[in-house]
Amino acid sequence: MAVVLDADRIGRTLTRIAHEILERTRGVEELAFVGIQRRGVPLARRLATLVSGISGTEVPVGALDITLYRDDLMRHSIGAQPVVGHTNIKFSIDDKRILLVDDVLYTGRTIRAALDALLEFGRPQSIQLVVLVDRGHRELPIKADYVGKNLPTSLSQSVQVHLLEIDGQDQVEIQE
Amino acid sequence: MKRLLKGGRVVDPANGRDGVFDILIDGDRIAKVGVNLQAEEGTVVVSMPSGLVITPGLIDMHVHLREPGQEHKETVATGVLSAVTGGFTAVACMPNTSPVNDNAGVTQFILKKAADANLARVYPIGAVSIGQKGDQMAELGELKEAGCVAVTDDGHPVRTALLMRRALEYTRMFDMPVIEHCEDPTLKGDGVAHEGMVASKLGLRGIPGEAESIMAQRDIALAEMTGGRVHIAHMSARQTLDAVRYGKSRGANVTCEVAPHHFILTDALLAAPVPYDTNTKMNPPLREAADRDAMLQGIVDGSVDVIATDHAPHHYDEKHVEFDRAPFGITGLETCVPLCLDRLVHSGLISFSRLIELLSVNPARILRLPGGSITEGAPADLTILAPDLHVKVEAKTMKSKSKNTPFDGWELRGGVAATIVGGRTVYNNAAVNLAI
Amino acid sequence: MKKDLLSIDDLSADEIYRVLDTAEAMREIGERPIKKVPTLRGKTVVNLFYEPSTRTRTSFEIAEKRLSADTLNIAVQASSVQKGETLADTAMNIEAMSPDMIVIRHSSSGACNLLSRICKSRIINAGDGLHEHPTQALLDAFTIKQHKPSIEGLKVAIVGDLLHSRVLRSNVLLLTKLGAHVFVSGPPTLVPRGIEQLGVTVATVDDAVRDADVVMMLRIQQERMQGAFFPSLREYYNLFGMTTERVSRAKPDVIIMHPGPMNRGVEIASEVADGPYSVILEQVANGVAVRMAVLYLLAGGVENEAAA
C-alpha cells in the first residue's frame, strides 16, 4: 500500500480545483454541485463550501445515487443486489451549470450512469466532471474537466479514497 | 397340493401363539399347526428363514376402492393388488362409490370385480341410507344378503340422530356394525385442516377436534341406548378417544379404529417441509401432537381396537391444485405395515402380538369375518412379515393407481415378505425372495 | 433474499431492514419530475390476479413501471376458475413465456407456494387467501418507521377481524420479528385458535389500545363472513369500532393505520380515519416505494440457496 495523497494534499487540491472552477466560470449563480454516492457527495460539499467562501455566493449541492442506473445489474445469478443509496437534489437543475463530482474516474461507466440519472431531473445548461483522482483505463469516451491528480495505475491495482466524513480520515491509497 | 411352512415364528394372538410352529396348508385351508410336523409324501416343504414372522392375514377394514364410478383413481383390481402388496389378505371397501353401494346390484358388481382380480378378499360395506343422503334407510337386509359386512355413510356421518338410532336398532337383526365417520357438519363447515396454531398461521379454515368427538358422543349414546354396534372410523382427536373409553366403560357396543397417519403425523407437516402439500390433506385432518400422542396411548392401552388405513386414492391432477380445492385423503395400503412395525413395534410401544390384534384379530371380530387366526380348518390366509427389512417408501412404484402419500421417501424398518390368500401366494416380495 | 417472497417468514430481520432502507431510496424517485429509473429494463413482470384488487394491483403496476419493467396484467375471474384451466396449468403456460417475476393474488391460501414449486420465475405474493400479504406488512412497517424512531419495543394494537385477515398474519410475523409488542383484539369468534403461539397477546380492545404507539385497524371483510360471527355491524362498531374516545387511551403520538379499503362507521369512525393521527393515505403512497424495493431486491441473484 502506498499513500498517494495525504490530508494536506487533498485539502490543497480541492482548493486549487475550486479556484479553477471560478476562473473558468462567468458568474457563480448558475453553478450547482452534484456528488455521486458515496464519496463524491462529501467532496461536492467541500467544493461547494470553498466556492461559496471565495465567491460569497451560496452554491447548491445535491447527492446522486447511480445504483439503479448501473449497466452491470442482474448480470449474475447469485449474490445480493447492490445497496441503493439516496438521491437528494432539492433544486431544479434546469439551465444550471452542473459540476458532477466523484472520487475516482476509472472505466467511465459510473459517469455514464450518472449522466443518464441526472438528465432525468431536467435540462442543465452544461455538465462538467470533477474527480479527485483519474486512474485511467477508460472503457467509455468520457473525460474529466477538473482532475485533482492523474494517477497511472495497472488493472491489478486498486485506488482507495478515504474521506473524513465517511472513513474518519482523508487519504488516497494505491493497493496492489 | 399341500405345503408345509416349517420352523417360522408364528404370531397368532387369537390362539395364544407366539413362537416357532409349523403350518401345514392343504389346498385353501389350514390343515394343521404344530411343532415338528412331518411332511407326507408330495408335500412341498418351505423352510422359513429366521427373522420372518407368520401372522394371520392382515385385514384393512377401511379402504376406498373407488369402483364403480371413479376408476381413474383406483379400481377393485388395482386396489386389491395394492392390498396384497401391503400384506393385506382382505379389505373392506366403503360404499361412497358412484353409484353408491346402497343396493345388492352394486355389492354384487364389486364382488364380481374382486373375484375377477382374485387377489385379496373384498368385503363390501353398504350404505346406511339411500344414496348416503341421510334420509331413507337402504335395504340393509338385502345388502347383508348380497355380502356386505357392515354399513356406513362414510364420507359423511349418518345425517340425523334419528336415522342413526334406527340403523343401530335395525342392524341388530343382522349382527352388523354401523361404521361411523364422525363429524359435525356445522362445526366442520368448509374447514380443510385441524383448527390450531398451524392452520391459523397458514390461513387455512379449521376443523376442531370437537367436530369429531361431538358426533362420536351422539353415536355412542345411541349405541348404548339401542344395544346396536357402532364402530368409530378413522379416529383423530383425543376427545373422541375419551368418548370411546367412556362408552366402553359403560358397556356400550363401541369399537374404534385409527389410521397410521393419525398416530404418526401431526399438522406441522402442512407447513413444512413442503408448505401446503395436498398430500397432507385428509379428513379427519392431521391434528396436533397432543392428539397424535393420545392415539398412540390408545393403541398401547387397548382403547383402540383396530388400525385401518382409510386408503383414499386420488388422481395426481386432483391433488395438484390449491390446498383448499384438493380432495381429502391419502393412500395407505402399501405403507401401513412398514409404518406400524417401525413406529409401534420396533419403537417398543407394543408387542408383535398386539399389532396383529389391531391389524387382523379385531377387524375380523368386528366384521364377523372368517380370518383373524391361524386355526385348523380355517381359510389359509397368511401374511409373512419381514420385520427387519429396510423399506424405502417410493410413491411412484406403488401398485395403487394413485400415488398420493405423504410418506414418499420415508425409510422404515419392517416390511412384507409374502401374502397368502386361500393357500395361494398372491404376493412375494422380491427383496426377501422367499421360496414360497 | 430467497428466490420468492411468499411469506414474511422468507425474510430475516436484516432483510426486512434492507427492504425498508431500499424503499426509502425508492421513495425519492416518486418525487422526481420523471418518475422512472431504467433498473428493470428488459425484465417482464406478470401480475396474475385471481381476486379483484384495485389498490394492490395498481400499486405493483406503478412500482414496476417506475423501474421500467415490462408489465403484463392477467386478471382471472374467480367464476371462470371452476370451468377453466387449473392454477398449475396457468402457471406452466405463463412460465413457458419466461417472465422474470410473477406477482400473484389468489383467494386460496398457499396458492403462491404452488406457483413457486412450478415456476422458475421469482414469485411475489400479493395476498393469498387468509394466509399472508407480505408487501402490505412491509409498507406498514415502512410507514411506522417514518413516524417512530424504532419499531423495536413499540406497542402495536391490531384490532378487527383477525380470523380472515392475511394482513394480520404478515404483520404479526414482521412486527414480532423486529421486536414490537403486538396486542390483537377482536370478537372472540374472529380470533384464530392458537394465535398467541405466534407471540402476540390477545386482549380486550381497551387493553390493546391503552398506551399503544400504533393502532392498526383491520377491515371487516363482509364478503368473507359466512356465518354469524357477530350479531350486527352496529354492535360491532359499539364494541370494537375505533372512535376518538377509544383512540384517546393510546399514547398522545399514536398513529392510526388501516390497510384499506375502509368501512367507515364499522371498524373505524370517520373522525379517526381523517383525523390528525391517521397515516392511512401515507400507507398507500408508501406502497409503491416498498414494492419497488421488493421488485429490485428480488431481481438480483439468489442468496442463501444452493443455486446455479
Image (cartoon, helix red, strand yellow):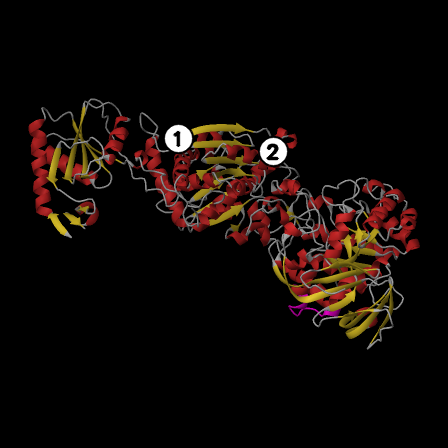
Badge number at residue C223 = 2
Q: Residue at x 16, y 37 (%)?
A: A131
> Which segment did they paint magenta?
B343-353
Give x and y (percent) for residue C116.
Answer: 52, 42
- Give left or right: position of B32 versus C201: right
As drawn, C225 above or below B55: above
Subunit that carries the residue with mark 2: C
As drawn, B429 above or below B276: below
Give x and y (percent) for residue B414.
Answer: 67, 64
Badge number at residue B26 = none
The answer to whether tags 1 and 2 share a subunit is: yes
> Mark 1 vs mark 2: which is more N-terminal?
1
Q: Residues within 10 Å of mark 2 (few under 14, many from 20)?
A: few
Camera-side residue of A161 and B250: A161
* Label 1: element kind: loop
Residue under numbered circle 1: C42
User: Which residue ends up furthest to the bottom in the rendered image?
Assistant: B36
Viewer-nearest of labels 1 and 2? 1
Q: Residue at x 87, y 59 (%)?
A: B368
Task: Tell me which amino acid carries mark 2.
Answer: Glu
Give x and y (percent) for residue C43.
Answer: 41, 32
As drawn, C48 above or below B295: above
Task: Tell me which amino acid carries mark 1.
Answer: Gly
Give x and y (percent) for residue C132.
Answer: 52, 42
